[in-house]
Every structure is written in C-alpha cells, then in structure tokens.
Image (cartoon, helix red, strand yellow):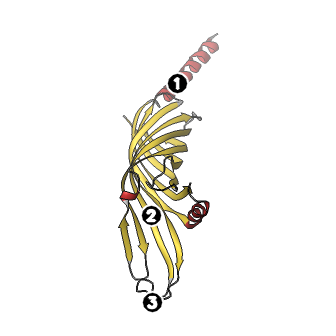
Amino acid sequence: MKQSIVFLLFAFFFNSTICKSQDDRKGLYVGVLGSIDYAGLHVNGGDEGFRTAWNDLSKPRVGYTTGVIVLDRISNLFALEYGLLYSKKGFRTEMEVWTIEPDPLFPNGGKLKTTYDFHYLEVPVKANFYLLQKKLQLYISAGASANILMESGNSVKLQTKDIYTNTSDDYKPLGVNLLASVGLEIPMLSKTTIRVEPIFRRSLSKVNKSGDVKWYVYNPGLNLGVFYKL
C-alpha cells in the first residue's frame, strides 16, 4: 500500500512537471532573425519564345532578409507570428556582346553582366503547427507577407565602368508573397529560444507593372533567429 502511494505521488509530480514545462512554452515571444536567400526569377505569360529566353537567361543570386518577429504561442501545438522585415533580393543575367565597330564601353566585346535588385519592406503573417513536443520543437509553417517596394535598380557591369539605373517606376509598389517553411526551435535558457528554419518565399502577384509578361521573384533561404519570452 505504501509503495502504491509513493508511486502515485511520483507519477502525479512527474506529470505535473511535464505539463508545467509544456505550459511554459505558451506566451508571447519577441525575436530577431536573419536569412541568407538564393533569389531568382520565374517569367510567365506573353510570347512563349520571349518567356523561355528570359527563364533561361536569368540566374539566381544571393540576397538576404532580416528584421523583428513577434511569436504568439497560443498553445503547445499552434502559434501565430508576425513581424517587420527588410529584404534584398533579385537575379542576374549574362549576355555575349559582339561589336562590329570599336565601342568605348566594350573595346573587345565580351559579356554584358546585369544584376537586378529589389529592396522590400515586408510584413509577414504565419501560422506554425508544432509536430514534436520534446526539448527540440519541430513545426511546419505557412502564411503570406505584404511587401512594400522601397527601391529597385539594375546594375550593368561593363569593361570600362559600371552603370546603375533606378527602375522603381517599372515595378509595382505593393506585392504579396506566399511563405512555407519547416523549422526547429531549441530552448537554450529559461526564456531564450534559438530557431533554425529553412523557408521558401515566392511572389503571388507579379512584380512588374507593364506588358503581358509577368515576373515572379522566388527566394528560398535559411532563417536563423533568437527569441525571448516576455
């Protein structure tokens, strides 16, 4: 009888400890994150030959995303997060240039290298669904972000000099991105959590203004973040 009482007390204490540990995960967190992205361009619509040429010509390039995130851990299985991020993304092209007459910009011909940059202020909203309720917490996430274009431009690299052109008027000032990710949260201290999150972002609306040809920018990346529980 005595052993049974001790066992029941131990089981109650152990269960309470586990529940308390899980309940402690609920609450409001504030964090900062940064992401190295690999951005590129997908062209749709318009003439098939033109579309195919652009898709073949454009190449991904490295960009980044950084900012502040608020995580509302509503329950052990579900959380909402939103934030304010700054991102730089784009793509590049390379074309061979042959000159019949001497050209001071291309004395010997060669490759015309152009980089396309987009600078956005992003407001993401995501829902996180937690699958693993251990010390390491695994989740899947989906959502969207409203993107405000801060600036866009083309940089043309010539043999003798570089030329930058501001192209902000050629692109939509507002856009929407779809977001999908799988993440791992690792509690480090009593109120501090580290996040590692592969994420995929893609523009839902075209980024360019004119013409039947539609430009969509995509950028898979790896988020690294630190969160503090308030």
Query: Could you tell me the amino acid type at mark 3?
Result: Pro
The C terminus sits in image quarter: top left
Residue appearing at x 37%, y 73% in the figure: 163
Q: Is residue 84 above or below residue 2?
A: below
Query: Could you tell me the amino acid type at mark 2?
Result: Tyr
In this rendered view, identify the residue nearer to me: 131 or 58: 58
In this rendered view, identify the residue nearer to me: 172 or 225: 172
The N terminus sits in image quarter: top right
Q: Is residue 85 above or below residue 191?
A: below
Residue appearing at x 43%, y 86% in the figure: 103
Cα distance in 3D space between marks 3 and 2: 28 Å
Q: Residue 187: in sight, yes or no?
A: no
Residue appearing at x 55%, y 34% in the figure: 129
Query: Could you tell me the amino acid type at mark 1?
Result: Cys
Label 2 or label 1, whichever lies nearer to me, is: 2
Residue appearing at x 47%, y 31% in the figure: 25
Q: Residue 92: in sight, yes or no?
A: yes
Residue picked out by circle 2: 116
Q: Earlier in the sequence, mark 3 or mark 2?
A: 3
Which secondary structure, mark 2? strand
Residue picked out by circle 3: 102
Residue 19 numbered mark, or none: 1
